[in-house]
Image (tube, rainbow, N blue to C red):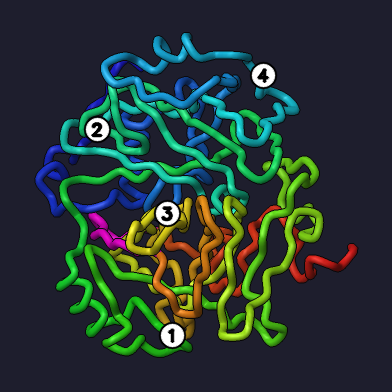
Amino acid sequence: MSGAQTWAGGDELAGARPGVLPSQLLHRAIAAGWIDGDDDVIPESSVQPASLDLRLGDVAYRIRCSFLPDRETVEHKVKDYVIDELDLRGDGAVLETNRPYLIPLIERLALPHWLRGRTNPKSSTGRLDVFTRVITDHSYRFDEIAPGYRGGLYLEVVPLSFTIRVRQGLALNQLRVVSGQAALGDDELRALQARRPVLLRAGAPVAEADFATANGLFLSLDLRGDHEGRVGYRAKSYAPLLDLSQTDAYRPGDFWEPVCREDGDRIVLAPERFYLLLSDESVVVPPDLAAEMTAYDPTSGELRTHYAGFFDPGFGYDSAGTLKGSRAALEVRAHDVPFMIEHRQRVCKLTFEHMMAPPDKLYGSEIGSNYQGQVETLGKHFRRGTTTGERR
């Protein structure tokens, strides 16, 4: 990339209200060369209401360990750790479980000094227990892109439950571009909840006593489940190969086993097994806000919740008010020891940020969003309307 072009209007935006860049400004950033496809046109479908899908390049490096470049470039430092090189063109390549891979992404950045970036797995990636994080040159942090960063983006990929096939152009992660400090504080969140509720239960705002905040608002688990007591799924061991380019293609029963509650509305998580569960509350993200789920909260015990983090404007929202929020899918893993969790136990946290402006398109059915109004945790790769035991 030879350098960013001039963005007409960019100067006034530098001094505008802090916030996340919406879809229409992401388009302008692409046109200005601040986000570039490295001689490949960024497709319209990559631009989401408050984020940009990041696509895999044509090669994956199998590496012997994860690393951070610190004061070096990623391209220079990875040379010490490469074990094999896989071609992602055509039919792509198979990535095996519990092995780290590093994949250069198609997109590159040339951000102005007043813009920074943050990345997270797409929701469908997290629901497959595929651990991903972005690395940038001269950085000592994952997923955080420094203000004014110029250079390439590299994705570390570790399939944890399933062996997967990936191809060039597939998007596993998303980029959110932010100006300034845009996060809402707890007082702002409480005022927002009183004015236009963002956290609901059974279609009504949660009781004030249940609206718990600590630099974000907490979500709890639904461990009552459906009429059969099913509360979610647990990944099977030794499942078949899963091609991430395929949607509505796989029988859930080949990959998942149902999880049912015990008496007392609780379950015991087996150590190092991957679970898909649902939040008890429903979330509403209005057009002028974006949200993000924290990946791990030490107050919730020896477990990790929700690998995939971005909630775009419009999640659980419609202007008519007929949609009473959408529940969040929670990807949960206990570490070291069996861990008991109970109904309405708080396990993760949702933070909110101001948008620089409302996006010109919202999350929902009109743009093909997969998880609006969800009552099921399984991702888009699995056939809908079947149980884990059904054959189809």
The spot of residue 56 in percent (x, y) is 55, 30
The spot of residue 272 in percent (x, y) is 58, 50
Of residues 201 and 56, the one drawn nearer to the viewer in this rendering: 201
Contact between marks 4 and 3 (CB within 8 A): the answer is no
The crowd level at tag 3 (other Cα within 10 Å; few <14, some 14-19, many 20+) is: many
The crowd level at tag 2 (other Cα within 10 Å; few <14, some 14-19, many 20+) is: some
For the residues labelled 2 and 4, the Cα–Cα distance comes to 30 Å
Of residues 150 and 218, the one drawn nearer to the viewer in this rendering: 218
Closer to the eye: label 4 or 1: 1
The kind of residue on which mark 4 rests is Asp
Extent of the magenta region: 348-360
Where does label 2 land, which residue? 146
**Which residue appears at 48% of the width and 74% of the height?**
221
Which badge, 4 or 1, is on the more N-terminal residue?
4
Where does label 3 land, which residue? 309
Q: Is residue 370 left or right of residue 68?
A: right
The kind of residue on which mark 2 rests is Ala
Up the image or down, 54 lies above or below 299; here it is: above
Instruction: Please tell me the numbered disc located at residue 201.
Output: 1
The kind of residue on which mark 3 rests is Gly
* Residue 32 visible in the current orientation: no
For the residues labelled 2 and 1, the Cα–Cα distance comes to 38 Å
Of residues 32 and 346, the one drawn nearer to the viewer in this rendering: 346
Contact between marks 2 and 3 (CB within 8 A): the answer is no
For the residues labelled 2 and 3, the Cα–Cα distance comes to 19 Å
The crowd level at tag 1 (other Cα within 10 Å; few <14, some 14-19, many 20+) is: some
Q: Residue furthest right?
A: 391
